[in-house]
Image (tube, rainbow, N blue to C red):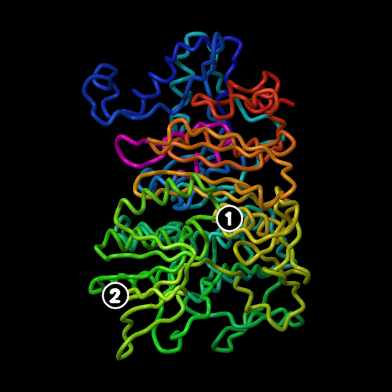
Amino acid sequence: MKRVYVNEEVCIGCRLCEIHCVVQHSKSKKIIKVFKEEIRRPLARVLVEEKGPISFALQCRHCNDAPCIQACITGALYKNNGFVLHNKEKCIGCWTCIMTCPFGAIKRDEVAEKVASKCDLCFGEEVPICVRKCPNEALVYENVPTGQEKSIPILNNPNVSLPGGETDQENPISYVIIGNSVAAIGAIEAIRTNDQENPITVVSDEPHHTYSRPLISMLLSGKVTEDRMYYRDADFYEKNKVTPILGKKAKSINVEDKVVILEDEQKIPYDKLLIATGGKPFVPPMKGLDKYEILTFTKWDEVKKIKVMAKSAKRAVVVGGGFIGLKVAESLNELGVKVVVVELLDRILGLVLDNIGSKIIHDRITKAGIEIVTENTIQEIVGSDSKITHVILKDGQKMDCDMVIVAIGVRSNIEIIENTPVEVNRGIVVNNKMETSVSDIYAAGDVAEAYDMLYESKRTTPILPSAYAQGKIAGDNMSKGTSEFPGDLPMNSIEFYGLPFMSIGIVNPEIAFPDDSFEAITDTSNLKNNVYKKIILKDNRIIGAILIGAIDRAGIITGLIKDKVNVTPFKENLLDDDFGLISFPKELRKEKLLGVV
């Protein structure tokens, strides 16, 4: 596998690499037409960092274990022959790739379509255009250093072939996975990297081919169609020799006999078992639950039901002002339903934003016509003839509505391990290999309680990038691998009415560290344009960040958190608009760009 590297000593910042890259990815491939006639001019896939007299091109490393791929909620990013490629048709502009790219090498196209612009190394050409056209030969196209060649392919592209590997046919292994979301996909892809023959069985209570749960709000609003919901291609199971048992629930596990028992009493034997059952919606107690149907919002079939009801509904009450609640509220509002969001905390998104950030999003949402009620909750649901007519809040306030959707959050779905010796706390407790307390049983995703690198304790982290990464670690170790999970890092990237924001790590440190052993630096100079930046530090290391409106290069911040870098030498530059790798001290920059320690 090859990468583009930069020799910063000879880069003069002429930007010819950017210009030729734009032309290479244009429709006409003619420089005059591109810059004078083409309305949707492509973004450059290579950037030039400049600060003072220093300039150098920011190359695409195409990481062996690309975090952008793990974070992608649609499967738009994938690997082919070692290269990270981007399927523009599947990209929805969620910007999770930007949040995770440690080199800031992914950009967002705000002018044309909402898609990420990812360097493809001019895929199919012998040498990338930026390398060929660099007048100082500052860009170099070289092989990955010896010992770094291994990478796990993302098999959502028909041109990808499985790598060679060894399979012990004298001691066959049966892999069983309970669950069919991203943790399961990560496990399947890791298993097939190590073992191409032994059978994999996937059991799911949902009837659907694997799909992306974060897309269900866009499906409700009509921004994506059903055919774009799928996380992997239609032939994914077939290509990976997976037997899917869909629409059938696994009800229990017999640990002694090593079998999974389905709801129809069918028994599935296993040698290695992965529990990836995800989370289930939390519904608080309220009077009237036994009489009237309330809705939750975590699965595809729930969306179908809500979409049908929304055609005749005039008013809806959404319980929960977190990500799930606000996205369903946004979708219903766009369908013409009058929506009220009821949140128990004193602000929306209270767990992932501070007061300033919450107010920016609050104002954005209410301006669009959604009403928000805080420090309140539903006391009683009232109706007539099995139909909801109104709800009564804790403070006695009455709200007319046709439908109630509870979207407070999820709890680990641990029903499957009841009456087993598998250790459980808030979720299924796992070690750094994603092993549970019972031999040959693994857990990954929202159901798992794994190590958190910031809190330095085990926690559940219900986010997609974490679920995929955990599934991949589990799959590797199930198939005789040796990988270890470095720890969770809470990350969220989302948009509300065109305003993007990211929340990374610990963003409310006063709760985590009541002794004030942290430092927060903020930039509120452009709040009028809904731009807000905040970095939280502890012992001169970044532990959290909030970025609203200006999210480019967010992945560099994420990388600094993961690597626990002491940012003292460039702390004053962290909130600069042009903050990038050029802001790093030379030695740290070389380490990041070239892998040189």
Q: Circle 1 sits in a helix, a strand or a loop, which is it?
A: helix
Residue under the image location 60 percent in, 34 percent down: 521
Instruction: Please name whichever residue, 388 or 426, is drawn nearer the observer in this view of the structure.
Output: 388
Where is residue 413 drawn, in percent x and y?
60, 73
Instruction: Please name whichever residue, 403 or 236, is drawn nearer the observer in this view of the structure.
Output: 403
Q: Which residues are magenta?
A: 95-118
Inspect the image, locate mark 1, and give the three-letter code of the amino acid beneath it.
Answer: Tyr
Provide the major secondary structure of the magenta segment. loop
Inspect the image, locate mark 2, and give the three-letter code of the amino acid beneath it.
Answer: Met
Residue under the image location 46 percent in, 32 percent down: 119
Instruction: Please name whichever residue, 349 or 299, is drawn nearer the observer in this view of the structure.
Output: 349
Where is residue 243 drawn, in percent x and y?
53, 70
Residue with the mark numbered 2 = 309
114 within the magenta span: yes
549 within the magenta span: no
Q: Mark 1 or mark 2: which comes first in sequence?
A: 2
Task: Report the quarter where the N terminus lies.
Answer: top right
